[in-house]
Image (cartoon, rainbow, N blue to C red):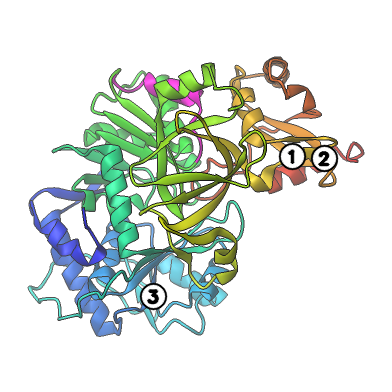
Amino acid sequence: MTTTTADIAALLDGRPDAVALVESRKGASRTTRRGELVRRCHRIALALREAGVRPGHKAVVMTRDAHDLTAVSYALGLLGAVPVLIEPRAEVGRCLRDVAPDVFIGEPLAHLGRRALGWGRPHVRVALVTGSAPLPAGRRLLTRTRADGSRLPHVREPGGDEPALIAFTSGSTGRPKGAEYRRSTLAGQLDALTTLMGPRPGDVLLAGFLPVALLGPLLGLTTVAPAVNHLAPARTPPEELVGPVLEHRASIVLASPAVLALIARHCARHGVTLPSVRQVLSFGAPLRTGLADALRGAVPDDAEILSVYGATECLPVSAIGDHDLRASRAAPPAGHAGTCLGRPLPGVRARILDADATGLGEIAVTGPTVSPAYHARPDADAVTKSDTGHGVLHRTGDLGRIDDEGRLWFLGRKAHLVTGAGFTLTTEDIEATADTAPGVRRTALVGVGTAVCQLPVLCVEPLPSTPHAAALAAVRAVLREHPQGHRVGALLIRPSFPTDPRHNSKTDRMRLAGWAAGRLRGRIR
């Protein structure tokens, strides 16, 4: 596949009557067919050009409407402009200072924030409002009326591997950074996702993460965007997820573990099954076997459940099925504690840098899915990027090993190592074991105290139905079977962990460590 954003119209022109995108909101669906999407993109591109948008302009697109996000981003690509996607709950002002956008396109709420907080000032020269709600003195970008038959004005053909998209990281592991995707990066991602999903005629993708709505139609998939609460995905009403799967007979479900847990719990509670689903892809955090078991109760026996590893800067990298995941947990190779991530996808190469005597080091990746640079962040590039004979090598910040079968193993983030007196603990090594304790939703290992003499503290989030004392007893029991379990100096119950804003699946360890320090005041050395 050689797909680029400049080829959007050609991609979508085939099968004009096929459904491209469905937005499902509170029992109502809004459908756009492929031919209609092409016409809408052309009309929006005309409007953007008339408003002053030109090739090379950086255009922030901030809307929770899947149709508007997709059509506007495609239209910008047709013009040769560069869409910029920023997490709504990230440090938006700082992100906009980094990117210095020429254009700001968004729903009224985003513009209110822009005006009140000075986002993008003084760089934004073109500001356009999407949606139907009025905004005083706002210039509307009409995205929902019918095309008038006008043709897209001539724009120059892209010259080489030009910038195609800037996607900001969520900020869950540090200051948000804008990962630059070039035309080849998007093409590589589409190739990798095609390999991963193996799309079939008639497949329907449920996109539990809004930006996936951009890629689904380009993969030839009918893409359903459910009413996920994008500011707090784990608080999404589960019927807003399960209902669209059943109504539109979704065959592929792509979501974070937090969203997949909502689906699994709803199905178990109400005795619902999802007979149309042939594949589940879990993104954003490691898939635990307990959640995989719960999903197994909702999907057909022959359905594939995949845990997919990657990051905004390199997505996807590898994948592992739930059956292989269980087998790896039951009999890990010697010295390979942690969580197995599977083998790298075709064309992706993984290396372990700065490895110790056990082979533990930082996971680094090369391949067509790797973002070549951060936008306007040479400091971050200097730390994480280097040129190799196989392209740009990206340091992920994740700790891991590669076993004799070529499989990646994840041990946690470098920044989250817990260093005690004469020992070091990786978070995933301890948590992958502790999370198997009955009655426990998840655990998180944090270090409290000075950097070289930390007290390892394991925070425990029990299931709502589990008494706190029972949860702690269960965790203690499984830790006794772990060779490093005796290093854990304290167990603390926390009914709900702070998590990342994008997926609600990664624990915010800085906040959790601060909370634990307050609870253990007096025990900190």
For label 2, the SS is: loop
- Which of pointers 3 and 2 indicates the residue nearer the eye? 2
Mark earlier in primary sequence (1, 3): 3
For label 2, the crowd category at 10 Å Cα-Cα, with few meaning under 14, some 14 to 19 and many 20 or more, is many
Q: CA distance from mark 1 to mark 3?
A: 41 Å
Tags 3 and 2 touching, CB below 8 Å = no
Residue at 21% across / 39% down in the picture?
199
Q: 345 or 234, which is in the foreground?
A: 345
- Residue 58: which disc? 3
Residue 217: percent from the left, percent from the top? 22, 51
Residue 461: percent from the left, percent from the top? 64, 30
Q: Is residue 128 left or right of residue 454?
A: left
Amino acid identity at mark 3:
Lys
Report the magenta residues as a range. 285-300
Q: Is residue 193 above or below residue 299?
A: below
- Magenta-colored stretch includes residue 293: yes
Tags 2 and 1 touching, CB below 8 Å = yes
Residue 31: percent from the left, percent from the top? 19, 50
For label 3, the crowd category at 10 Å Cα-Cα, with few meaning under 14, some 14 to 19 and many 20 or more, is many
For label 1, the SS is: strand
Mark earlier in primary sequence (3, 2): 3
Residue at 65% across / 46% down in the picture?
414
Q: Which residue is mark 2?
A: 454
Q: 138 or 445, which is in the foreground?
A: 445
- Residue 280: which disc? none
Q: Which residue is mark 1?
A: 418
Q: 38 or 24, which is in the foreground?
A: 38
Q: Is residue 464 visible?
A: no
